[in-house]
Amino acid sequence: MYKIREAAKLLNVETIDIHKKLISLKKELANHVHKKNGITSIDQEGIDIISLSFAGVKTEKVASKIATEKTNREEVDSENNEDATIQVKMKRNGILTIQIMTLDGSIVKTIERGNKNSGSHLYHWNGKNVAGNSVGRGIYFIRVVGPNIDEIRKVMIIK
């Protein structure tokens, strides 16, 4: 848990910017901001949402789901050859883009970029970057963009 001042320092912004994000992202942060004895704290997922917001990335939960095949968790153990399964439900035809990103927004790998028909689509990410090398342990984001879809999902690589 991070207090407002700690969150600002972590994200290299002013405390007023954190307060503004708490207001503008109230719905997205509802389960990640906690108040106790007049002190506001933000959990790690809340920090991630705020960080992505500063980078211009929206987080919405509507059309995609991510889980590993074996455990139905958002964790991938690359040493046990687990994949993250990404399920996308498109309500209409259009261009679908699925990208794996680091916390700072750098693109690790593009899983899909192309025209897709409406319906359900499944994709897999094996924890490797565009060069085919295993990524380091940590949190990564899967961004899904398509017709009326702009979502971010978190996945953790464990080893």
Image (cartoon, rainbow, N blue to C red):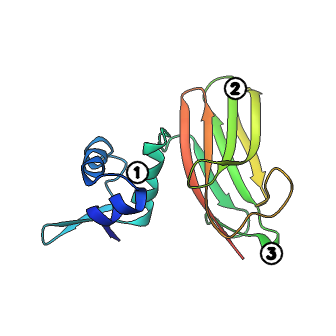
Q: Earlier in the sequence, mark 2 or mark 3?
A: 3
Disc 2 designates what residue? 95
Q: Closer to the observer: label 3 or label 1? A: 1
In the rendered structure, the answer to whether residue 60 lies left or right of residue 143 reads: left
**Amino acid type at image mark 1:** Ile
Q: Quadrant of the C terminus?
A: bottom right
Residue 13 at x, y = what percent? 36, 52
Look at 43% across and 44% down and name the residue there: 54
Label at residue 80? 3
Q: Looking at the rendering, which quadrant does residue 155 occupy?
A: bottom right
Q: Relative to 52, does residue 47 appear above or below in the rendering? A: below
Q: What distance separates the C-alpha of mark 3 from that of mark 1? A: 32 Å
Q: Are marks 2 and 1 in contact (CB under 8 Å)?
A: no
Q: What distance separates the C-alpha of mark 2 from that of mark 3? A: 33 Å
- Give 36 or 50, whichever is nearer the viewer: 50
How many residues crowd around disc 3 within 10 Å: few (fewer than 14), some, or many (20 or more)? few
**Amino acid type at image mark 2:** Ile
Look at 43% across and 65% down and name the residue there: 44
Q: Relative to 148, does residue 76 appear above or below in the rendering? A: below
Q: Earlier in the sequence, mark 2 or mark 1?
A: 1
Disc 1 designates what residue? 50
How many residues crowd around disc 1 within 10 Å: few (fewer than 14), some, or many (20 or more)? many
In the rendered structure, the answer to whether residue 63 lies left or right of residue 2 reads: right
Residue 82 at x, y = what percent? 77, 67
Residue 152 at x, y = what percent? 55, 46
**Amino acid type at image mark 3:** Asn
Q: Secondary structure at mark 2?
A: strand
Residue 7 at x, y = what percent? 35, 62
Look at 76% across and 28% down and name the residue there: 114
